[in-house]
Image (cartoon, rainbow, N blue to C red):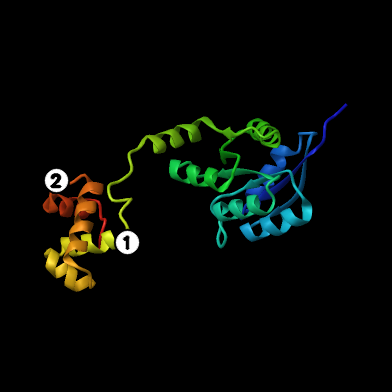
Amino acid sequence: MPGPRIRVLLIDDHAVVRGGLRFFLAGADDIEIVGEGGSGAEALELAARLAPNVVIMDMMMPGMDGIEATRALRQRFPEIRVLALTSFGEGELVQRALQAGAIGYLLKDTQGSELVAAIRNAFAGAPVLSPDVTRALVSTLNTPPAPGGDLSERELAVLRLMVAGLSNEQIAERLYISRNTVRHHVHNILAKLDAANRTEAVALAVQHNLVR
């Protein structure tokens, strides 16, 4: 006895891409394309009206992009699975899509049989990543974060004035804070940048474009 048909919604701002997806999925008896749209806003509207099981979502769209649409879709309809499908396989984009709630991430050169299998796996609640995407994600996760990513807005303000050559006393006057507070910020900046002194901290700030 056949199982339930998987209701699929196609979201991509290029009609040609949507046509190709329809062609790939036409031969799968257990998959039914219930609708298609060209924007993130349409994805939310159609999902509310058509109740799909799986949404195939392009990541790069004008207006509300696929990341934002995926996050909103998962918040409103947590039972819907989102498969990201895009031409871009950068690890950072993959990570953002998964953090937004996508259950899988595929590239647009994925074969039709792989796309069908991915939809079935997503419907069953199994994460789906193509090999190239997995490698990109692992590479991103294994890359050490750039120095200065954990600096607060106030610490960045102090660092900016350090780069300009101001002393602690001058920084205190410029920011209307005490010299003790400036010393505290400088101490934290050196620790977070793993810098031995002010000169090294300034060099790192310039090297990594931490301040303007």
Q: Is residue 212 left or right of residue 4?
A: left
Is the residue 38 above or below the residue 192 in the image? below
Is the residue 160 above or below the residue 1 in the image? below
Q: Nearer the viewer, residue 162 or 119?
A: 162
Determine the secondary structure under disc 2: loop
Of the 4 image quadrants, the one containing the C terminus is bottom left
Crowding near pointer 1: few (<14 within 10 Å), some, many (20+)?
few
Residue 70: mark in rendering? none
Residue bearing the label numbered 2:
196
Crowding near pointer 2: few (<14 within 10 Å), some, many (20+)?
few
Q: Amino acid at mark 2?
A: Ala
Q: Amino acid at mark 1?
A: Glu
Determine the secondary structure under disc 1: helix
Residue 153: mark in rendering? 1
Q: Nearer the viewer, residue 189 or 203?
A: 189
Q: Nearer the viewer, residue 153 or 28?
A: 153
